[in-house]
């Protein structure tokens, strides 16, 4: 195999000028690297502007994407840089950034290294606890500029092997194959020269990772490629679906199977706005969607791991919550950081997420849907777990009309959201199915009757003759794109006349242009927050699934292709998109957007092959 670090450049046609808006590299001009415990973003300018290590939810020593002046970064550039491009080593989490000047071309290769000969589906601690950066001059001479600046309160201290980042007991050690002169190092290099850097957060007292940086990169590439041989997919957007699989794995906490919603905090849903949230946690609703998608492209161990994590958290906590930290515990209270200005001065920057303490009744259905998928695998369900789950089924029967904060986690007074009622229906339906299949104790007939009653109430009480659509609340209200998920959760069939009408109404009234959808309109559906937000990408993938299930296959394929065109050059997707500019908004990359892409691709592939199974969970 050709060495990862030794590959040459492809053509020049994909190079683009390095962009900066308000002093910030755009969100979409970044790539993700990680090792199943930590994660970092690398910009097209060659800067590592976000790093959380040794865990996804640790305080980031590098947070330049949230404060270009004071957030901190590890940067590499070249004098007179003109343009750049980024590309992943195929089927891996190894990222290349090429910087070009009039006289030279440099390739920067970034990765978090993995244990050689590891199996990403089986090992519990795959990472070596280091981020490596290999800088290779493909055409020279060039002057390479290396900058090192951590976020406050981290401090730099010289070390016999390089530089130490220190914040109390927390330490990161930066070393290189050349001496590093503190915050700024300049190197005059010729074609073929290589400079390697290693940023380690594991204690350096032991022997450290074996081999050179180049050898560790090659070993890491082989681990990724061996894992990717499991992915089973042939259909629309194959390249993007495969990249989505890698992205989900980069968001997977290998130690226990949790999958975080995104590796970042506080990237804004509107520039200059206050809708900035910490997404470095695991949402229960993400689990149900993610497991469903992963199983259908061959990632069965990952699906099983996430299911196990969810059910273990529920059994230990004894209370349904919308989200947990990656240990399955309740996150710390939400706080605002006074020291960071926010991406493009969109404040506040938040750590923690108060949604963990909201009433969100859809959690009942998400948990029981996960349990149902667990039973589908033939896994034994212990009596203690079933006792807790069956109690949740009964609770869902009692709360489905009770107001809550809903799937979108509004910060107003609670309301009786249609989606929340629908997911209580899911809890009752799945509870009945599990009890019957596994011959477990439970009032199956009553649960089924309650589920049928909720479905009937949704079709009647949430219906608006004026809008010719189901609405966000039982009793009326505005439109809500989460209604598109009802067929995916087997609550209402996609081809039911009222669901078909709702699909049309959502596409027309919540449409933001070019296939994008707002999840709701704040002026019609107040959420307690100032300002607006971008179009929510997952909702558009839900629309693809509804169109496909309604035998509108040509429209579904056309929309799917439009959405695939929204991915950045690396195949990564955000949470939201600004419809007026196409710019990425929200935390990035977003797990659910990639889950939506995978699910829609699978559904379309089956429809296009004429499969009797639609892929939608009817």
Image (cartoon, rainbow, N blue to C red):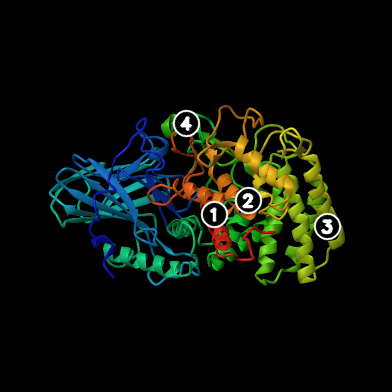
What is the quadrant of the N terminus in the image?
A: bottom left
Q: Is residue 387 above or below residue 564?
A: below
What is the quadrant of the C terminus in the image?
A: bottom right
Q: Going 71% across and 55% down the picture, which residue do you hit?
A: 490
**Distance from the alpha carbon under mark 3 to that under mark 2:** 27 Å
Going from N to C along the chain, the mark reached first, 1 or 3, is: 3
Where is mark 3, residue-wise?
A: 447
Q: Going 53% across and 42% down the picture, which residue do you hit?
A: 515
Q: Looking at the image, which is closer to me, 48 or 459?
A: 459
Q: Residues within 10 Å of mark 2 (few under 14, many from 20)?
A: many
Where is mark 1, residue-wise?
A: 595
Helix, strand, or loop for circle 3? helix
Q: Residues within 10 Å of mark 3 (few under 14, many from 20)?
A: many
Going from N to C along the chain, the mark reached first, 3 or 2, is: 3
Left or right, 607 with respect to 54, comes to right
Where is mark 4, residue-wise?
A: 271
**Distance from the alpha carbon under mark 4 to that under mark 1:** 25 Å
Name the mark on residue 546: 2
Going from N to C along the chain, the mark reached first, 4 or 1, is: 4
Q: Position of residue 575 (x, y in %)?
A: 51, 44
Do the CB atoms of the residues marked 4 and 3 lie less than 8 Å apart?
no
């Amino acid at each position: 195999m050709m060495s990862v670090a030794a590959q040459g450049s492809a053509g020049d046609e994909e190079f683009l000028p390095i962009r900066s808006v308000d002093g910030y590299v755009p969100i979409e001009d970044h790539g993700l690297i990680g090792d199943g415990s930590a994660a970092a973003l690398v910009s097209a300018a060659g800067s590592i502007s976000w790093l959380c290590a040794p865990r996804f939810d640790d305080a980031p020593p590098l947070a330049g994407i949230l404060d270009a002046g004071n957030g901190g970064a590890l940067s590499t550039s070249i004098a007179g840089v003109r343009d750049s491009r980024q590309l992943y080593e195929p089927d891996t989490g190894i990222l290349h950034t090429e910087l070009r000047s009039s006289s030279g071309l440099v390739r920067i290769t970034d990765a978090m290294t993995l244990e050689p000969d590891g199996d990403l589906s089986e090992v519990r601690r795959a990472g070596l606890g280091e981020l490596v950066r290999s800088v290779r001059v493909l055409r020279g001479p060039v002057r390479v500029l290396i900058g090192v600046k951590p976020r406050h309160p981290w401090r730099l201290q010289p070390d016999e092997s390089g530089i130490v980042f220190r914040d109390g007991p927390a330490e990161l050690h930066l070393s290189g194959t050349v001496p590093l002169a503190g915050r700024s190092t300049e190197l005059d290099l010729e074609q073929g020269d290589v400079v390697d850097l290693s940023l380690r957060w594991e204690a350096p007292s032991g022997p450290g990772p074996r081999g050179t940086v180049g050898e560790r990169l090659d070993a890491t590439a082989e681990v990724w490629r061996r894992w990717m041989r499991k992915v089973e997919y042939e259909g629309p957007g194959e390249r993007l679906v495969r990249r989505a699989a890698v992205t989900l794995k980069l968001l997977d906490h290998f130690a226990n199977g949790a999958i975080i919603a995104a590796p970042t905090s506080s990237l804004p849903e509107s520039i200059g706005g206050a809708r900035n949230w910490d997404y470095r946690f695991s949402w229960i609703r993400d689990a149900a969607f993610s497991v469903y998608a992963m199983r259908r492209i061959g990632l069965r161990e990952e699906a099983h791991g996430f299911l196990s994590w969810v059910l273990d958290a529920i059994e230990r906590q004894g209370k349904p919550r919308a989200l947990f930290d990656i240990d399955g515990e309740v996150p710390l209270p939400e706080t605002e950081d006074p020291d960071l200005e926010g991406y493009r001065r969109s404040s506040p920057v938040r750590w923690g997420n108060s949604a963990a303490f909201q009433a969100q009744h859809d959690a009942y259905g998400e948990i029981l849907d996960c349990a149902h998928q667990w039973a589908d695998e033939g896994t034994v369900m212990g009596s203690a777990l079933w006792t807790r789950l069956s109690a949740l089924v009964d609770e869902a029967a009692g709360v489905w009309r009770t107001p809550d904060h809903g799937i979108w986690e509004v910060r107003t007074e609670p309301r009786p959201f249609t989606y929340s009622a629908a997911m209580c229906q899911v809890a009752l339906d799945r509870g009945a199915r599990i009890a019957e299949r596994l011959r477990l104790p439970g009032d199956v007939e009553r649960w089924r009757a309650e589920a049928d009653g909720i479905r009937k109430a949704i079709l009647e009480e949430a219906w608006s003759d004026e809008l010719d659509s189901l609405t966000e609340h039982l009793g009326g209200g505005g439109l809500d794109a989460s209604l598109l998920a009802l067929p995916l959760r087997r609550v209402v069939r996609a081809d039911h006349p009222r669901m078909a009408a709702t699909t049309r109404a959502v596409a027309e009234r919540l449409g933001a242009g070019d296939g994008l959808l707002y999840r709701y309109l704040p002026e019609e559906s107040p959420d307690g927050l100032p300002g607006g937000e971008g179009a929510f990408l997952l909702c558009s993938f839900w629309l693809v699934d509804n169109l496909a299930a309604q035998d509108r296959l040509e429209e579904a394929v056309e929309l799917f292709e439009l959405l695939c065109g929204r991915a950045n050059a690396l195949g990564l997707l955000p949470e939201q998109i600004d419809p007026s500019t196409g710019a990425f908004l929200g935390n990035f990359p977003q797990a659910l957007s990639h889950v939506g892409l995978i699910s829609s691709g699978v559904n379309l592939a089956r429809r296009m092959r004429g499969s009797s199974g639609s892929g939608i969970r009817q």
